[in-house]
Image (spheres, rainbow, N blue to C red):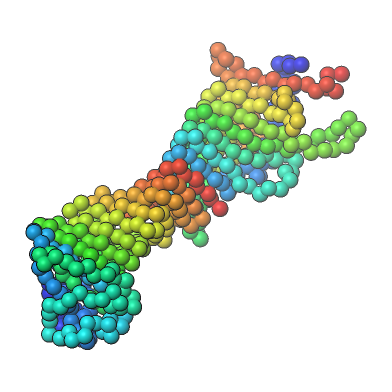
Amino acid sequence: MAIRLRTGDAEPRANIRLSQFVYNGVIPASGSPDSIVSRQGRGIRLRIVAVVLLAGAVWLAGCSTGGPRRTAPPSETGGKAAAPQAPKKKPAEESIIKAEFQKAEMTWADENGVPVWKAQFKEATASQTGESAVVELRGVKASLYRNGKVASSLVAPRVVADSRSKEVRASGGVKITSAVDGATARCERIVWKSQEDRIIGVGAVKMIRGNLTVTARSFEADTTLNKARFTEAELSLD
Amino acid sequence: MRRIAIIPALIAALGLYVGLVGAGSFTIGKMKLSGAVLEWDMNKLTITAQGNASFVSLGPDKPMKPGTMQLKSIKAASIRVDLVRTKDKTFTAKQAVATGGVVIDAKQASEETDQAGAARIVVRDVHATARTASLPESREVVLLTGDVLVKITEPGVQEPVAVLAGEALTVSLKDNKLRIEGQASKPAEFTITLKEEEKK
C-alpha cells in the first residue's frame, strides 16, 4: 500500500495504491485527506468516502492543508453526496485507512500497467492482504477495459472488486452499456471476469441492441456485449 | 374419401403455388425468437435459438389477400436467423434456417368460386413438418427437406384437403414453380380429399 499526497497543485490530490487498485481524488480546499493507519494481522483495511461536491464544506474541521493527520472517523453526515455507513468502533488493533476526496475515482491496472477498469464512486471500503486487495464500492459508475481500451460502462449500486481473482461483482440492479454500439444490458447482478473478457449476468435480463430486445433468465457475454449467450430467452425484432 | 391422383394433386399443388406466388407478405419481418438457449453474435450478425426453438412471425394482423401466404411460426430443435444492419443501425432478418423436427404453420388465402358463382376468399391452414427448413436470403425460395409432409386444412374441417409428402419441397417464387421430390424407394405423393360436392 502506498499513500501519496500532492498538495502544491491548484487542485491538491491524494493517491492511494492498494495492490493493483489506485484511488485518486481531489483534496478539498479546506482540508487534506484524513487518515488513520494501523494494522490488523497482515491485513489493511481502507475506507474512502467520496464527496463529489462541496466536499470542502463538509471536510473535517481542523484539517490542515499540509498533509494527513490522525483523527477520528467522520460522522455519517459527512457529506451530501456521500452515504457513509455509521462508523463502527474498531478494536485497537484493527487497521483502517480513512480518507475523503472530491471527485474520487479508482483505477485498476494489470501487472503491465494496462488499465482494467476505472470507476467513480460515492463510497468505498477496501481490505488488503499480502499483494491482493478486495474493494467494495457503492454508487458506482465504471468503465470496463479490454486490451487497454474501454469496452463498456457499468452502473451499479454496489460493486466488489477482487485484485486476486480479477473479478468484479456488481449487484443491486446493474446496467452495462457497450462502447461499441451502445447496446445495453440490465439485470439484477453480474460478475465480470476481466481476464476472460466475460460478463455473466443473472436475474431479469434485458438486453437491447437497436431494434433487437432479448429478455432472459441469465446471460454470458464478452465485455462489449457483441457475443452473448442467453438462457430461457426470447428475442423480439421490431 | 381419399384418392391419390395426378390431376387433384396438380390442383392442390396449384393452390399452394398460387398462394406462394403472390407471397409478397412471405417475408421474415418482425418476429419473436425463443429457446432454452439463445446466442447472438453481432460480429457475424447471427442469432441462434436452441432447445424448443420457436420463431413467431409478427406480421401485420390484417385480412389476407387472395393468393398470399403468411408464415405464422416455425418450431424446431434449432433455428438460426441471419441479420443485416441497416443504415439507421437497426436490424432486419434476411434469412432463417431451422433444423431438427421442424414444424411450420402458415396460412394461405385463395379466392374460389362457389357453386352459385359467387367469389369467396378461403383461408387454409398449412401445417408442414420436415427435418430442415430454410428461408434463404433471396426470399424467393422456401426449402423444406427430409421427410417433408404438408397438410392443408380448411377451418372447421378436420380432414386435410390436401397432403403433400416427399423428401424435399422447393417453392420457387421467382420462377413460379413448386417442386416436390421423392426418392427412388419413396416417391413423392399428393393426396387430396374431395369434398362431397366435388364427388358428385
The quarter of the image holding the N terminus of chain A is bottom left
Residue B200 visible (yes or no): yes
| Left-right relation of A85 to A33 | right
In the rendered image, residue A107, in percent from the top left (x then y), is placed at: 22, 66
Identity of the residue drawn at 11% across and 60% down: A43
Task: Name the residue nearer the viewer: A99 or B130.
Answer: A99
Query: On the image, which quarter does residue B165 sit in?
Result: top right
Q: In this view, does A213 lie above or below B122?
A: below
Identity of the residue drawn at 47% across and 50% down: A214
In the rendered image, residue B133, in percent from the top left (x then y), is placed at: 54, 33
Q: Is residue A107 above or below residue A188?
A: below
In the rendered image, residue A195, in percent from the top left (x then y), is placed at: 23, 51
Residue A1 visible (yes or no): no
Identity of the residue drawn at 50% across and 47% down: A235
Task: Name the residue nearer the viewer: A118 or B6.
Answer: A118
Query: On the image, which quarter does residue A31 sit in?
Result: bottom left
